[in-house]
Image: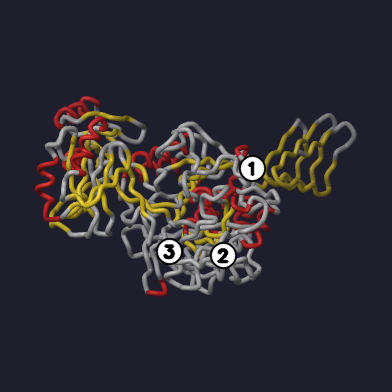
């Protein structure tokens, strides 16, 4: 079963869980100007209430014989299961409870994503909208402004008013770019509970066909050519990769705080807002960060960009539940505003509408516009052995130029069984740009397979080692894995899914920017796409609307190639300083400097400042009294 999390708001939420029974209706919300139709779930509802009335509300729920189950998400959010036949009576009676702000049904999209609506909605007014018009609209619907950011205004409606209807009215006013409820919805990690080890087992970095610790072997060369890229660069400490996920351990032995950018306000979930560390067994963020940047220090595993820095940003609560859609947008904005060069995302929502949550899409667009390379895992929705091609989830499929959507290949250079296939005929931007190696299949898809990518773990007994599971819950009982070595409980061999593939792309993007910091997100994406390996025996061909060479629906532009990408980045910032006479003091900078047929005049100085290499070729004249400095 897939791990799913609720995104919680700052209100009391009551969600009833049993079977999916639909009530016919024409409910919808606007994703920009597109109507997204919703069905009511007949046995689920959401209750918004004041936090100071929680005790009385809990007593009322416990004393109600029709309530099957209650799940409190925080001090103002509750999930409740109730008998379907009592739905109307329960709603009518409970709305009278002191402290209750609204009682709303749960809705579900045509793709099966449940969306809860409370008393809040979020808007972004058009730039030309006058403040007087904004005030007039607020007064008309008696809304309260709860928060104003550069991305949105968060509004609350009066008690017993319908936030969905009012949000729609704002959209229909023509004064806003978007207006939609501040949804509570499930957020999925694109890989769940793995385990992690050492470089010889990291087939995704260097595959020689070796037999790994789990007994599997692959195809030689079915990797991203990381060691070859490291001959050119292992990254720059000036490049920062934000990992939006479950958090990253402070001072991990393979990722010390000297290589983390841990900022106040980086925890958008529960707990200390200034501490983005994981809680419980929630190691997913660690594993993503380890793939990107684990140290090359003779311990544990090897990261792709070991000289770059990780900015951990936590967007999952301690119990695994997610956060509000506005806080997801805030987290993306936080990364952008605090200097992240790359934003790595191995999570998504179980729906394929590319405009599903406008506030999140706009945050992504803003990050790209500001210069951030944004990488998303495509999701694990396919089961190709059963004929299911899957689909790319939101927000991986946002139609924002420069966003990299990443699928998974396996240790044989084939499409991973769970990795979705692109669909060019879909209007929902079902396109995968590249794939990167991860585990082959889940145990309930192919019985001999499960997670097998290695990364870092929460030190000690928490995390993925020794705890093991995959999305199917079927794993061999082999004990601790790894079970020996320095700090072995700080590493795991059970990671995978497109969750592993996306940080590989983020790591290579960091290497590219370490070579040439002047590249735009679109230029970085173009390098990664145009240098991908045409692997797996698939047919790659030119496809309308896709500009960077030949492409395939299963593999995108191909398998991520770190070496080819870094080489391309070097070419993009190579300086050819040939056939010059230096008559004034001159400094030449670039990642590579080629010089030939250069004469430095007496009394003058030539400084060659290259990030990687300086090639000095004859004829090259530096007479007495002239200076040459090579940095």
At horizontal 16% and vertical 27% (from top left) the residue drawn is 139
**Coloring basis for residues:** secondary structure
Which is nearer the N-term, disc 3 or disc 1?
1
Instruction: Give residue 533's mark.
Output: 2
Query: Element at badge 2?
Result: loop
Q: Is residue 427 above or below residue 413?
A: above
Which corner quadrant holds the N terminus?
bottom left
Q: CA distance from mark 3 to mark 2?
A: 33 Å
At horizontal 57% and vertical 47% (from top left) the residue drawn is 459
Percent across and percent down for residue 358 are: 31, 45
Say which residue label 1 marks: 236
Instruction: Looking at the picture, tell me which residue is in the foreground, 9 or 416.
Output: 9
Which is nearer the N-term, disc 2 or disc 1?
1
Instruction: Give residue 159's mark.
Output: none
Instruction: Give residue 473's mark.
Output: 3
At horizontal 26% and vertical 32% (from top left) the residue drawn is 51
């Amino acid at each position: 079963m897939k791990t799913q999390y609720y995104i919680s708001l700052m209100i009391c939420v009551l969600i009833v869980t049993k079977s999916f029974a639909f009530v016919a209706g024409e409910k919808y919300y606007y994703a920009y100007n597109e109507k997204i139709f919703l069905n009511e779930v007949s046995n689920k509802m959401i209750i918004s209430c004041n936090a100071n009335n929680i005790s009385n509300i809990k007593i009322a729920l416990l004393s109600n014989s029709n309530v099957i189950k209650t799940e409190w998400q925080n001090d103002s959010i509750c999930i409740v299961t109730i008998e379907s036949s009592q739905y109307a009576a329960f709603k009518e009676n409970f709305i009278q409870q002191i402290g209750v702000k609204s009682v709303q049904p749960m809705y579900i999209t045509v793709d099966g994503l449940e969306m809860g609506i409370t008393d809040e909605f979020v808007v972004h007014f058009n730039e030309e909208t006058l403040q007087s018009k904004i005030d007039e609209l607020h007064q008309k619907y008696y809304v309260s402004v709860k928060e104003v950011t550069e991305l949105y205004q968060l509004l609350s409606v009066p008690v017993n008013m319908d936030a969905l209807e009012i949000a729609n009215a704002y959209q229909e006013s023509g004064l806003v770019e978007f207006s939609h409820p501040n949804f509570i919805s499930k957020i999925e990690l694109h890989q769940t509970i793995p385990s992690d080890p050492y470089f010889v087992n990291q087939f995704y970095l260097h595959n020689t066909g070796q037999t790994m610790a789990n007994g599997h072997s692959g195809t030689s060369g079915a990797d991203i050519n990381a060691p070859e890229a490291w001959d050119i660069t292992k990254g720059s400490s000036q490049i920062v990769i934000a990992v939006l996920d479950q958090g990253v351990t402070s001072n991990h032995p393979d990722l010390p705080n000297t290589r983390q950018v841990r900022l106040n306000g980086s925890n958008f979930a529960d707990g200390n807002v200034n501490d983005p560390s994981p809680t419980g067994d929630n190691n997913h963020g660690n594993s993503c960060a380890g793939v990107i940047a684990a140290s090359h220090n003779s311990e544990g595993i090897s990261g792709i960009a070991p000289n770059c820095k990780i900015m951990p940003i936590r967007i999952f609560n301690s119990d695994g539940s997610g956060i509000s859609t506005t806080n997801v947008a805030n987290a993306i904005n936080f990364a952008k505003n605090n200097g992240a060069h790359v934003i790595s995302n191995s999570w998504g929502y179980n729906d394929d509408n590319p405009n599903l949550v406008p506030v999140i899409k706009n945050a992504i667009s803003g990050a790209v516009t500001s210069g951030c390379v944004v990488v998303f895992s495509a999701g694990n929705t396919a089961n190709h052995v059963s004929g299911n091609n899957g689909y790319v989830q939101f927000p991986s499929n946002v139609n924002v130029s420069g966003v990299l959507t990443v699928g998974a290949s396996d240790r044989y250079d084939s499409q991973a069984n769970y990795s979705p296939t692109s669909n060019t005929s879909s209007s929902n931007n079902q396109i995968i740009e590249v794939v990167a190696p991860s585990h082959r299949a889940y145990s309930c898809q192919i019985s001999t397979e499960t997670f097998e990518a290695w990364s870092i773990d929460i030190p000690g007994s928490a995390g993925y080692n020794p705890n093991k599971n995959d999305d199917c819950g079927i794993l061999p009982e082999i004990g601790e894995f790894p079970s020996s070595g320095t700090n072995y409980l700080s590493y795991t061999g059970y990671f995978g899914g497109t969750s592993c593939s996306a940080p590989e792309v983020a790591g290579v993007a960091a290497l590219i920017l370490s070579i040439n910091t002047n590249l735009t997100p679109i230029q970085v994406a173009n390098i990664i796409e145009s240098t991908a390996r045409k692997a797996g025996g698939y047919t790659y061909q030119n496809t309308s609307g896709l500009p960077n060479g030949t492409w395939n629906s299963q593999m995108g532009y191909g398998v991520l190639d770190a070496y080819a990408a870094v080489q391309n980045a070097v070419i993009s910032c190579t300086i050819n300083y040939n056939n010059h006479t230096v008559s004034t003091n001159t400094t030449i900078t670039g990642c590579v400097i080629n010089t030939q047929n250069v004469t430095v005049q007496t009394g003058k100085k030539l400084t060659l400042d290259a990030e990687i290499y300086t090639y000095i070729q004859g004829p090259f004249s530096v007479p007495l009294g002239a200076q040459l400095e090579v940095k």
